[in-house]
Image (cartoon, grey):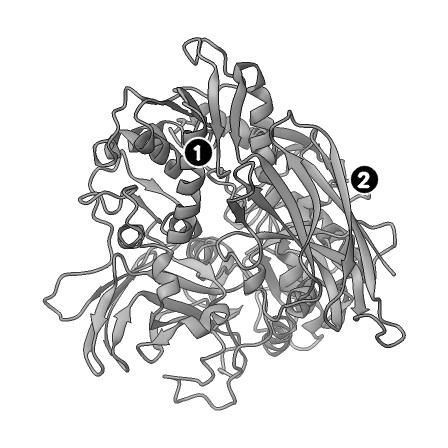
Amino acid sequence: MRSSIHKTLTFSSLLHIITRLNPSPITQFNPNPLRTMSSVSPQRMFQLRLDPLTGNSDWVVIEEEEDPVAENAPKPLLATTSYLDMLNDSRRNRAFREAIDKTVTKPCHVLDIGAGTGLLSMMAARAMGSGDSTTCSSSEGRVTACESYLPMLKLMRKVLHHNGMGRKVRVINKRSDELEVGMDITSRADVLVSEILDSELLGEGLIPTLQHAHDKLLVKNPQTVPYRATIYGQLVESAYLWKLHDLYNNETKASDDIHLTPTGMETILCIKPQQYSMHCDAIKEKIKLLSEPFKIFEFDFWRRPESHGEADLCIKAINDGTVHAVVSWWILQLDSEGIIFYSTSPKWVCHPFNMKDLHSSFPSAGDWCDHWKQCVWFIPGKGLSVSKDEDIHLYASHTDISVSYNLKKQAWGSEIGQHDYCAQDCQLFLSPERIAIYGNSSWRCSMLRAIKSVLQQKNCSLCVVADDSLFLTTAVAHLSKTSHVISLFPGLREKGAQYLQAVAVANGYSMDRVEVLDRRKVHLTMHDTRHKKVDLLIAEPFYYGNENMLPWQNLRFWKQRTTLDQILSNDALIMPCKGILKACAMSFPDLWKSRRSLKEIEGFDHSVVNATLGACGDLPASTESSCLPFFIWRCGEIKELSERFNVMEFDFTKPISPCSGNAQVKFKELGTCHGFALWIDWVMDAENSVVLSTGPDQRYWKQGLKFLTKPVAVGIHESSIGECCSAEIEASFDPSTGELVVNYAFS
């Protein structure tokens, strides 16, 4: 999947959306635009930019004649995509090259859908020979590359020109379902080469794309690369995965009288019933296998697929346990003979199960990569208890963009797989990590201790919850019977208000003491607070829909605190009162390899894309290295090379202001430093007795990773010559942009 934090629309598309838009009461910024967010021979485009300190987004015009990949263009436009990771996947590149060389052996018409940098198009153009072309519908070979995302298309043209392929590949800036034979292309294509796959296989629109291609763009019985894709799955037990979705039972274990999911409303706060992409190898020690791998669905690229499909499978348990999830992955067969394969399976799967007719060795999972992961489907509630050798019935179904599952122990048993809470108006969907945080006993205990501490210090008649924290709003209303609570809920808004109403009785408060402003306001006034000053301003901080942002983008709380300054009482308590930017020098070779600068890929020079895609290593000294959000513990091999240290502090008791800090880095381990992990520890109280960390040990928060321009060998004091023994890191925060600039120097 090629993800980005920028959405791009044509002028006409934007007008179409504006005229048809029916605003929902809850919106969530989606950092992963589909290819449908694209242009049709555009004259101008609109790029959606998010202000991290206000949460506001606006459309910035990109003119057709402007070059989004020029030196002065905004680097994050493509640096936050997964193109770089995908192009560094040598196993993928080699498999496609071998399959294309086997398939495109004569001049013919090749169509590349979702062409990206044009790698597959160039492979196809190179593979065409000058032999007999009577089996093709055209007398001469040609390649048509279809790419709808304008910035990517411009980058592809650079790559084609750099490799002398500009005249051998025709580039069209449209979606494939907008192409017409006789207008955009002269004839139907003989061969389809494409890679429009995400971790779930179907999420990038594989089925509708293939349907339209077979109906309108391809000859009868075309050749395709890939040839076939098969989805496999496995039943697993994992307490870690269970905590990511079952808030009700984990909350019951907390025993703190806060009921985010009261009895009878077990799924009022839950995750969406869908598959979630995840690096399952990172949690293999926390997984118990309860079945052998099994085949679920098969999709042939060379023929028109169906939009819907079902599979009813009987699976035998291989261990006693509780089924908490279905882990799934897919295998690509790239050639028609069944020789060339690519798998996204976890590393514990290393044999060609259920593929007895395979005549060649089957590749086990390759190097760590981030563009394709495994998928997890969570079994609702506590899961399904099974015994060894017991039969489990799995019902799987797919739409044109997703796969879903239901489990039952016997053919006549009740199904386990659907969320059953009926009050849909009150139901809220949160991310798995947020569900796990709300169910974490230690986190809840710390939060409650901090709240009780401030309530003991001061009689808070008016409390404002600045962020989207359902826990804080519920907890303050429950613990303080005299406080009036206003929740801003900038992301949840009306849905948050409906939720609070639904759980009020279970948490011992009435809605006459709790309110959510019914409109989004830039500034609160004394009129909004009924002419009362705010005694307590509180946040986690957590902003709905911002889970994929960098840690310091939650400094939005500081901005909000500043806008509320005029209505705060003189002795108002602020929680958290301080933020500490912390860092640690890290070795992460797998992640580095996936983001390193590109040179030659299967014979084609891709060095021209490095700066635009935010590559690391072998870049000009003036080039700024990337800082991107990751769950670092999921990034393959990792090692901390230094002590964790403070870089700078943010004082929330005062209005937002520019600030900076620096620190000396002392290395404690020998190794290769690839960058720095950065995160924020939230100091909840003035006594520093409650500090909530979002560092690498806390698995439900992403850290910001500052990549070096090139790796550095480091060592401890008196280490060998050539190894750096120390470094200095400095950071500065600009409140006008919300940007954190991080610089470093090794000595």
Provide the residue designation for mark 2. 72
- Residue 226 at least partly seen: yes
Expressed as whole percent of the image width and height from the top left, the position of residue 573 reads 51, 27
The image shows residue 330 at horizontal and vertical percentages of 44, 70
Residue 35 shows in the view = no
Location of the C terminus (image quadrant): bottom right
Instruction: Examine the rendered structure and indicate whether residue 458 appears above or below residue 545.
Output: above
Answer few, some or many: residues within 10 Å of disc 1's Cα (few below 14, many 20 plus, some between 14 and 19). Answer: some
Residue type beneath disc 2: Asn
What secondary structure is marked by label 2? loop
Q: Amino acid at mark 1?
A: Thr
Vertical position of residue 147 compared to residue 372: above or below: above
Q: Position of residue 426 (x, y in %)?
A: 27, 35
Q: Nearer the viewer, residue 98 or 421?
A: 421
Residue projecting furthest to the right:
721
Residue beneath the point at 56% across and 32% down: 557
Residue 69 or 173: which is nearer the viewer?
Answer: 69
The local secondary structure at tag 1 comes to loop
What residue would you read off at disc 1? 27
Q: Give the residue displayed 46% in from the left and 53% down from the top.
A: 205
Q: Residue at x 32, y 22 (%)?
A: 482
Residue 323, given in percent of the width and then of the height, sits at 28, 69
Residue at (66, 45) in percent of width and height: 581
The quarter of the picture where residue 318 lies is bottom left
Q: Quadrant of residue 295?
A: bottom left
In the current view of this chain or complex, which residue is farthest to the bottom?
A: 359
Q: Classify the position of the N terminus by image quarter.
A: bottom right
- The circle on residue 527 is none
